[in-house]
């Protein structure tokens, strides 16, 4: 189980492409995700390359969900 903190992808508004809405809400509410979860990053510069990231990833363009 992954524990997600503020500033990580799982709590970012750009994260979640390809993850079912109900599962994404649970990730954001509970701040946890299964080890094998990956989601798309919808940040403009990443969306065109279909970047997939872990909920515990991070970058300089974080925006709280």
Image (spheres, helix red, strand yellow):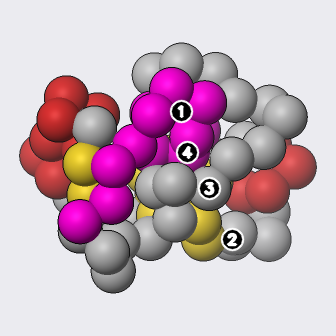
In this rendering, would 43 be left or right of 23? right
Q: Earlier in the sequence, mark 2 or mark 1?
A: 1
Q: Residue at x 64, y 22 (%)?
A: 63
Q: Earlier in the sequence, mark 4 or mark 3?
A: 4
The image shows residue 19, relative to residue 42, as above or below, that is below
In this rendering, would 15 be left or right of 51? left
Q: In the rendered structure, find residue 50 and report the number of the disc placed on it.
A: 2
1 and 4 marks in contact (CB < 8 Å): yes
Q: Residue at x 70, y 69 (%)?
A: 51
Could you classify mark 2 by the number of other residues whose Cα lies within 10 Å: few (under 14), some (14-19), or many (20 or more)?
some
Mark 1–mark 4 Cα distance, whole angstroms, equals 5 Å
Q: Earlier in the sequence, mark 2 or mark 3?
A: 2
User: Magenta part of the protein: which range?
Assistant: 1-14
Camera-side residue: 32 or 28? 32
Q: Which residue is mark 1?
A: 12
Mark 4–mark 3 Cα distance, whole angstroms, equals 5 Å
Mark 2–mark 4 Cα distance, whole angstroms, equals 15 Å
- Kindly state the secondary structure of the residue where label 2 is placed: loop
């Amino acid at each position: 189980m992954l524990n997600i903190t503020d500033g990580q992808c799982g709590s970012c508004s750009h994260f979640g492409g390809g993850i079912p809405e109900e599962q994404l809400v649970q990730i954001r509410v509970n701040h946890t995700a299964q080890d094998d979860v990956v989601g798309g990053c919808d940040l403009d510069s990443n969306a065109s390359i279909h970047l997939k990231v872990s909920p515990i990833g991070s970058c300089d363009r974080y925006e709280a969900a």
